[in-house]
Protein backbone atom coordinates (compact mmCIF):
# COMPACT_ATOMS: atom_id res chain seq x y z
CA UNK A 1 0.00 0.00 0.00
CA UNK A 2 1.59 3.30 -1.02
CA UNK A 3 2.31 5.99 1.54
CA UNK A 4 2.30 9.51 0.13
CA UNK A 5 4.08 12.52 1.63
CA UNK A 6 2.31 15.82 2.22
CA UNK A 7 3.56 19.17 3.50
CA UNK A 8 2.45 22.71 4.17
CA UNK A 9 3.50 25.39 1.70
CA UNK A 10 6.76 26.29 3.48
CA UNK A 11 7.64 22.69 4.39
CA UNK A 12 7.64 23.11 8.18
CA UNK A 13 4.71 20.72 8.60
CA UNK A 14 5.40 17.37 7.02
CA UNK A 15 3.71 14.03 7.14
CA UNK A 16 2.34 11.17 5.18
CA UNK A 17 -0.90 9.38 4.41
CA UNK A 18 -0.96 5.58 4.21
CA UNK A 19 -3.07 3.43 1.90
CA UNK A 20 -3.04 6.32 -0.53
CA UNK A 21 -4.96 4.57 -3.29
CA UNK A 22 -8.40 5.18 -4.83
CA UNK A 23 -9.70 2.41 -2.48
CA UNK A 24 -7.82 3.67 0.60
CA UNK A 25 -9.89 6.85 0.84
CA UNK A 26 -12.51 8.95 -0.88
CA UNK A 27 -11.43 11.79 -3.10
CA UNK A 28 -14.23 14.31 -2.93
CA UNK A 29 -14.73 17.88 -4.07
CA UNK A 30 -16.81 19.87 -1.61
CA UNK A 31 -18.77 22.88 -2.84
CA UNK A 32 -20.10 24.07 0.52
CA UNK A 33 -19.64 27.70 1.48
CA UNK A 34 -17.77 26.78 4.68
CA UNK A 35 -15.06 24.94 2.72
CA UNK A 36 -14.86 27.97 0.44
CA UNK A 37 -14.68 30.38 3.40
CA UNK A 38 -12.04 28.14 5.03
CA UNK A 39 -9.87 28.26 1.93
CA UNK A 40 -10.21 32.06 1.73
CA UNK A 41 -9.48 32.43 5.45
CA UNK A 42 -6.22 30.52 4.88
CA UNK A 43 -5.25 32.81 2.03
CA UNK A 44 -5.86 30.30 -0.78
CA UNK A 45 -7.18 31.37 -4.16
CA UNK A 46 -10.96 31.57 -4.16
CA UNK A 47 -12.18 28.07 -5.11
CA UNK A 48 -15.37 29.76 -6.47
CA UNK A 49 -17.33 27.20 -8.49
CA UNK A 50 -14.51 24.63 -8.51
CA UNK A 51 -15.00 23.49 -4.91
CA UNK A 52 -12.33 22.22 -2.52
CA UNK A 53 -10.58 18.94 -3.34
CA UNK A 54 -10.17 16.63 -0.30
CA UNK A 55 -8.94 13.08 0.25
CA UNK A 56 -11.06 11.59 3.03
CA UNK A 57 -9.18 9.02 5.09
CA UNK A 58 -9.23 7.62 8.62
CA UNK A 59 -7.12 9.44 11.20
CA UNK A 60 -4.79 6.45 11.74
CA UNK A 61 -3.70 6.81 8.09
CA UNK A 62 -2.23 10.24 8.87
CA UNK A 63 1.27 10.58 10.35
CA UNK A 64 2.86 13.94 11.16
CA UNK A 65 6.66 13.79 11.02
CA UNK A 66 7.56 17.48 11.46
CA UNK A 67 5.99 20.76 12.54
CA UNK A 68 3.31 19.15 14.71
CA UNK A 69 3.23 22.28 16.93
CA UNK A 70 2.33 24.47 13.94
CA UNK A 71 -1.06 22.80 13.47
CA UNK A 72 -3.96 24.86 14.81
CA UNK A 73 -7.67 24.33 14.25
CA UNK A 74 -10.25 26.98 13.47
CA UNK A 75 -13.99 26.60 13.13
CA UNK A 76 -17.00 28.54 11.93
CA UNK A 77 -19.07 27.64 14.97
CA UNK A 78 -18.89 25.76 18.28
CA UNK A 79 -20.26 22.57 16.68
CA UNK A 80 -18.85 22.97 13.18
CA UNK A 81 -16.01 20.98 11.63
CA UNK A 82 -12.47 21.77 12.67
CA UNK A 83 -10.31 23.10 9.87
CA UNK A 84 -6.62 22.68 10.53
CA UNK A 85 -4.19 25.35 9.48
CA UNK A 86 -0.37 25.30 9.39
CA UNK A 87 0.45 28.49 11.26
CA UNK A 88 3.98 28.72 9.81
CA UNK A 89 2.67 29.67 6.35
CA UNK A 90 -1.09 29.81 6.85
CA UNK A 91 -2.26 27.08 4.48
CA UNK A 92 -5.07 24.67 5.32
CA UNK A 93 -4.01 21.05 5.83
CA UNK A 94 -7.08 19.10 7.01
CA UNK A 95 -10.65 19.24 8.11
CA UNK A 96 -11.94 16.90 10.81
CA UNK A 97 -15.10 16.36 12.85
CA UNK A 98 -15.14 17.76 16.39
CA UNK A 99 -14.70 14.35 17.98
CA UNK A 100 -11.68 12.09 17.38
CA UNK A 101 -14.07 9.12 17.70
CA UNK A 102 -15.45 10.04 14.26
CA UNK A 103 -11.89 9.24 12.96
CA UNK A 104 -12.32 11.15 9.71
CA UNK A 105 -9.66 13.41 8.20
CA UNK A 106 -10.20 15.37 4.99
CA UNK A 107 -6.68 15.98 3.74
CA UNK A 108 -6.50 18.99 1.41
CA UNK A 109 -5.42 17.23 -1.79
CA UNK A 110 -3.29 20.21 -2.85
CA UNK A 111 -0.98 19.48 0.11
CA UNK A 112 0.09 16.15 -1.41
CA UNK A 113 3.36 16.26 -3.30
CA UNK A 114 1.74 14.01 -5.93
CA UNK A 115 -1.97 13.27 -5.98
CA UNK A 116 -1.62 10.79 -8.84
CA UNK A 117 -1.80 7.55 -6.79
CA UNK A 118 -5.13 8.47 -5.14
CA UNK A 119 -6.83 8.64 -8.54
CA UNK A 120 -9.55 10.89 -9.85
CA UNK A 121 -12.30 12.65 -7.88
CA UNK A 122 -14.93 10.05 -6.95
CA UNK A 123 -17.67 12.12 -5.40
CA UNK A 124 -18.92 15.67 -5.14
CA UNK A 125 -20.60 17.12 -2.07
CA UNK A 126 -22.99 20.08 -1.72
CA UNK A 127 -23.10 20.59 -5.48
CA UNK A 128 -25.23 23.68 -6.23
CA UNK A 129 -28.41 22.68 -8.07
CA UNK A 130 -30.06 26.08 -8.44
CA UNK A 131 -32.64 27.74 -6.24
CA UNK A 132 -30.29 27.47 -3.27
CA UNK A 133 -30.52 23.65 -3.32
CA UNK A 134 -27.51 21.34 -3.16
CA UNK A 135 -27.00 17.62 -3.74
CA UNK A 136 -24.33 14.97 -3.16
CA UNK A 137 -23.07 13.04 -6.16
CA UNK A 138 -21.96 9.41 -5.84
CA UNK A 139 -23.63 8.87 -2.51
CA UNK A 140 -22.35 5.23 -2.24
CA UNK A 141 -18.77 6.54 -1.91
CA UNK A 142 -19.83 8.88 0.90
CA UNK A 143 -21.77 6.09 2.62
CA UNK A 144 -18.68 3.86 2.38
CA UNK A 145 -16.71 6.55 4.23
CA UNK A 146 -19.36 6.58 6.97
CA UNK A 147 -19.04 2.78 7.22
CA UNK A 148 -15.28 2.99 7.57
CA UNK A 149 -15.68 5.62 10.29
CA UNK A 150 -17.94 3.26 12.24
CA UNK A 151 -15.58 0.27 11.83
CA UNK A 152 -12.57 2.38 12.83
CA UNK A 153 -14.41 3.50 15.93
CA UNK A 154 -15.49 -0.01 16.88
CA UNK A 155 -11.95 -1.34 16.37
CA UNK A 156 -10.60 1.39 18.67
CA UNK A 157 -8.29 2.65 15.95
CA UNK A 158 -9.75 6.17 16.29
CA UNK A 159 -7.24 6.52 19.14
CA UNK A 160 -4.36 6.53 16.65
CA UNK A 161 -4.80 10.19 15.80
CA UNK A 162 -2.11 12.88 15.61
CA UNK A 163 -4.66 15.69 15.99
CA UNK A 164 -6.43 14.98 19.28
CA UNK A 165 -5.67 14.12 22.88
CA UNK A 166 -7.50 10.81 23.18
CA UNK A 167 -7.87 11.15 26.98
CA UNK A 168 -9.66 14.50 26.92
CA UNK A 169 -10.98 14.08 23.34
CA UNK A 170 -9.85 17.67 22.74
CA UNK A 171 -7.82 18.87 19.74
CA UNK A 172 -4.04 19.23 20.34
CA UNK A 173 -4.29 23.03 20.07
CA UNK A 174 -6.93 25.60 21.04
CA UNK A 175 -9.68 26.20 18.49
CA UNK A 176 -10.02 29.69 16.98
CA UNK A 177 -13.74 30.38 16.63
CA UNK A 178 -14.79 32.49 13.67
CA UNK A 179 -18.18 34.11 14.01
CA UNK A 180 -20.98 33.87 11.49
CA UNK A 181 -20.49 37.58 10.72
CA UNK A 182 -16.77 37.11 10.07
CA UNK A 183 -17.51 34.16 7.80
CA UNK A 184 -20.04 36.25 5.86
CA UNK A 185 -17.48 39.06 5.57
CA UNK A 186 -14.83 36.66 4.23
CA UNK A 187 -17.25 35.40 1.56
CA UNK A 188 -18.57 38.88 0.74
CA UNK A 189 -15.04 40.16 0.18
CA UNK A 190 -14.33 37.43 -2.35
CA UNK A 191 -17.32 38.31 -4.53
ZN1 LIG B 1 -17.45 21.58 2.51
ZN1 LIG C 1 4.27 26.05 6.61
Image (tube, grey):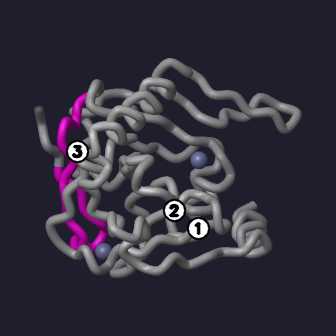
Residue at (64, 49) in percent of width and height: 48
Q: Which residue is mark 3?
A: 114
With respect to residue 43, does 161 lie above or below?
Answer: above
* Label of residue 82 in the image: 2
Q: Say whether residue 9 is visible.
A: yes
Image position, residue 155 (x, y; %): 27, 38
| Between discs 2 and 1, the one toward the N terminus | 1
Q: Is residue 40 left or right of residue 6?
A: right
Mark 1 residue CB less than 8 A from any atom of ligand 1: no
Q: Which residue is mark 1?
A: 75
Image position, residue 142 (x, y; %): 50, 28
Question: What residue span does the magenta drawing correspond to?
Answer: 5-21
Which of 108/103 is in front?
103
* Label of residue 172 in the image: none
- Are the residues tagged 2 and 1 within 8 Å (C-beta)? yes
Mark 2 residue CB less than 8 A from any atom of ligand 1: no
Residue at (43, 44) in percent of width and height: 54
Occupied quadrant, residue 87: bottom left
Q: Is residue 160 left or right of residue 80?
A: left
Tell me the CA gap for discs 1 and 3.
28 Å
Q: Is residue 174 left or right of residue 114?
A: right
Q: Residues within 10 Å of mark 2 (few under 14, many from 20)?
A: many
SS at circle 2: strand
Labels 1, 3: front one:
1
* Total numbered circles: 3
Image position, residue 84 (x, y; %): 43, 66
Amino acid sequence: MPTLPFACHCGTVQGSVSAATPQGGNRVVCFCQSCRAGALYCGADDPKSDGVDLFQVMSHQITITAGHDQLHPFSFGPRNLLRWKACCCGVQMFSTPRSPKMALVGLVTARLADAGPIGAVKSRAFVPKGGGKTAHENLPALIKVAGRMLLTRMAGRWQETPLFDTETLQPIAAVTLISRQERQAILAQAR
